[in-house]
Amino acid sequence: MSVSGQVNWPPEAPVWNFTWEVNDGDSEAIAFRNINFRGKKVCHKASLPMIRVRYDSGAGPYKDPLSIGNMQGPVKVYEHNQSGYRHLVVESYHRIGQYHLVNRWFFRSDGLILPQLHSAGLQHPASHQHHVYWRFDFDIDGAANNLALAHVATGGNWGYGTGWMPLPRETWQATSAATGWAVLNKGTNRGYLIDRGPHDKPSDAFEPGDMYATAYHGTEDLKGRLGTAYSSQISSHVNNENIDGQDLVLWYIAHLHHIYHGPEFEWHVCGPLLWPLRY
Ligand SMILES: [Cu+2]
């Protein structure tokens, strides 16, 4: 069984417009489609197609699929008010072994998007790292003429503000290479900034990437089928294609360290902050 819904929020004066779906047979949690903010296109699709977990000792690694098969209860869509802002929240709750996983997306009234994975429970009594992969198929003001940029600590000016370096070809970056990213439409200058989440730790040998930028190909949207416990395999989509002024996909990876202190039940959260630019 697949489930889906349509969002126009807030109802009295909508700023967010998109559809969501959880499809039988896929394992990308909720797939958001045709996300528009203030009537302007942001993403063709946004989803969470991969989680990989590495234990320091004793077990794994694992690839944990978020599917309709392990979803508990319905997708929840509700309003949440915090710090003077209204948010629309769309979330799914999953159980895999001993894990409790909440896939929660906040759409704030000012355009901020917070995709978060909350996890609790221990599969094995050992410290481990969750690597959480969000796939953003950006279409800023449409599929054409998009550009990815990295914010580099070394400075430099390429015409997009100090430190903002265009990424003209498919690439990936580790924590040491960039402090954040952006995707812009080169014609309108609208875009979205992608900031690391406050709890997202540096990349490591198990997943060296924090970000992959690839050209859009429909055949590369594998809806949770890409990667294994041992490799995300996103690098197989990185082969130096031109992405300057193209339709592109940006992956963001959070590295969540779960330190074992004993058999406690404790929630951990990770995920990036997506800020609107000139909407
Ligand atoms: Cu954990």
Image (spheres, rainbow, N blue to C red):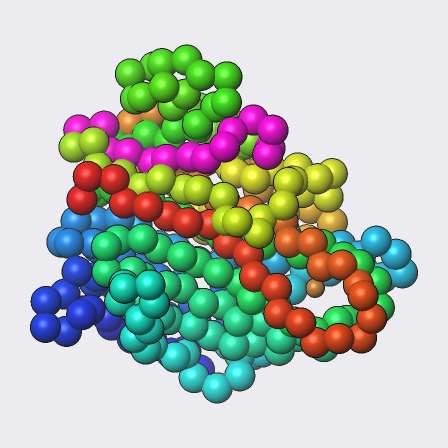
Q: Nearer the viewer, residue 20 or 38?
A: 38
Q: Nearer the viewer, residue 156 or 21?
A: 156
Q: Is residue 185 magenta?
A: yes
Q: Is residue 47 left or right of residue 263?
A: left
Q: Quadrant of the C terminus?
A: top left
Q: Residue 16: horizontal and vertical position, in percent?
A: 21, 61
Q: Residue 18: horizontal and vertical position, in percent?
A: 25, 63
Q: Residue at x 53, y 71 (%)?
A: 102
Answer with the quarter of the image where residue 32 lies: bottom left
Q: Residue at x 59, y 34 (%)?
A: 175
Q: Residue at x 63, y 49 (%)?
A: 255
Q: Is residue 75 magenta?
A: no
Q: Is residue 19 visible?
A: no
Q: Residue furthest bottom?
A: 73
Q: Quadrant of the N terminus?
A: bottom left
Q: Residue 29: horizontal and vertical position, in percent?
A: 48, 67
Ligand 1 occupies quarter: bottom right
Q: Is residue 89 visible?
A: yes
Q: Nearer the viewer, residue 174 or 144?
A: 174
When the figure is inspected, residue 116 is found, relative to residue 97, above or below; the finding is above
| Number of numbered tags placed on the structure image | 0
Q: Residue furthest left?
A: 12
When the figure is inspected, residue 262 is found, relative to residue 73, above or below; the finding is above
Magenta region, residue range: 174-187
Q: Residue at x 44, y 42 (%)?
A: 195
Q: Residue 240: horizontal and vertical position, in percent?
A: 49, 24
When the figure is inspected, residue 218 is found, relative to residue 125, above or below; the finding is above
When the figure is inspected, residue 268 is found, relative to residue 170, above or below; the finding is below
Q: Residue furthest front?
A: 83
